[in-house]
Image (cartoon, coloured by chain):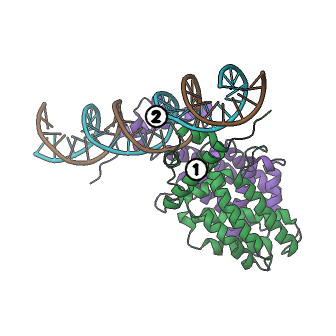
Chain colours: A green, B purple, C brown, D cyan
Amino acid sequence: MARAIQQRTLKTRAKLLDAAQAVISENGYDALRVEEVVLRAGVAKGTFFSHFKDKDALMDQLIGKEIDQLLDQIETRSTPETIAEMVDALMPMMDFMTCERYVFDVILRHSGAAANSDIGPIAMTFERHAEVVSKWLADKPFRTDISPDLQAEGVQAFEIQAISLVFCALHNAISPRERLETYLTAWLMPGR
Amino acid sequence: MARAIQQRTLKTRAKLLDAAQAVISENGYDALRVEEVVLRAGVAKGTFFSHFKDKDALMDQLIGKEIDQLLDQIETRSTPETIAEMVDALMPMMDFMTCERYVFDVILRHSGAAANSDIGPIAMTFERHAEVVSKWLADKPFRTDISPDLQAEGVQAFEIQAISLVFCALHNAISPRERLETYLTAWLMPGR
DNA sequence: ATGTAAAAATGACCGCGGTCAATAATAAAT
DNA sequence: ATTTATTATTGACCGCGGTCATTTTTACAT
């Protein structure tokens, strides 16, 4: 039978995560180097990869944690009554997702779980996010011809679209906030 | 003043592109290595990078060319009368975009031009694709409360969403074809 | 033909993510 | 306390994308 995980393991992992967080808060996500992290954590390079499958897995955890906290904030709010309120609620998350191009890329890569067995932190937040929006739409419906779940999927699709265009030189004349509001109005209140 | 571009340059670039195409047709996009390409092309590694900014730029060209040809096919069709017909028209492109996870990632990375000055081949195809769909929707309107351009943006958002879920273990029970049809019906024919 | 300046090609080298056989530390068995 | 089996750590090493000072080739002027 499998042994209990050692204290040492938890300590090392914590050291790695702390070091990574420190690097990121100083220089941002994109500038993170595994070598820098292990140097600060005081462990060998190989140790990093026995704790995280690869660099992306670390990013998945750190970025997922961040999004999860933003979802906590979102859940404290009451169900939005208008599209504008809904966009207001979503903006902090959108802002984080666009804080760095690299962050957005990581999020996209991990938004869908590669395998059912290991649903990563970011993929979890996408599930959770869809549930939250679905509940909103069931609670205070804007349109009733399709299910709240389908509506929520659409909201996510438009969020991604709005975010993508932030990084697109051709289409960044209007703000993501404005754009998302336009999209969601057309999606959730067709004909009005 | 700038000199005319040498024949040698064109030949070398063609050799590199041919070699890359050969590697891809044998082993797929993901397996392409720059070293393998320069080996087959019979040039030095540095030469590759004086012809392409980086590996991604090569992929941008090759994948962009492929999508462009699929758009040619799409444009030969008459304006779709139904959502099902529209989905039929789009499926070949969707299939290519999902042929490899790596291909999808490259497409996402290049879907928006980083700078107005250099709009890459893939970003061009996204513009072109939006125009085609917009024309369809202006020609045979499904809904009239919002502009064809906005509708086309939504179609693209839902295409990306449908494709993303192909690579997601949690959500690949239904085919991308079915999923896209559901999305587009809800988007283009709300309330029906 | 010869000189010359611009452009193209070269390949040794670097950065950095990731691997793996060897080693050390730990927990359980005697 | 000693042995043994399991787990954690190590760091030299590899793969591969990308750089750059140097060399070679080309186009043009004389």
x and y percentages locating residue B80 in the rendered image:
77, 58
Q: Nearer the viewer, residue B13 or B73?
A: B13
Seen in the image, is A191 located left or right of residue B119? right
Residue A15 circle label? 1
Chain at numbered mark 1: A
> Can residue A76 be seen in the rendering of this structure?
yes
Which residue corresponds to the image point at 80% horizontal and 66% vertical from the top-left?
A132
Q: Secondary structure under badge 2?
A: helix
Residue D20: quadrant of the picture:
top left
Residue D27: quadrant of the picture:
top left
Which residue corresponds to the image point at 81% horizontal and 54% vertical from the top-left?
B179
On-image quarter of the N terminus of chain B: bottom left
Seen in the image, is A178 located left or right of residue B137? left
Labels 1 and 2 in the same subunit: no
x and y percentages locating residue A185 in the rendered image:
75, 75
Badges 1 and 2: C-beta atoms under 8 Å apart?
no
Q: Which residue is mark 2?
A: B15
Q: Amino acid at mark 1?
A: Lys
Note whether D8 is above or below B164 in the view shown.
above
x and y percentages locating residue A140 in the rendered image:
85, 76
Q: Secondary structure under badge 1?
A: helix
The nearer-to-camera label among 1 and 2 is 1
Q: How many marks?
A: 2
Chain at numbered mark 2: B
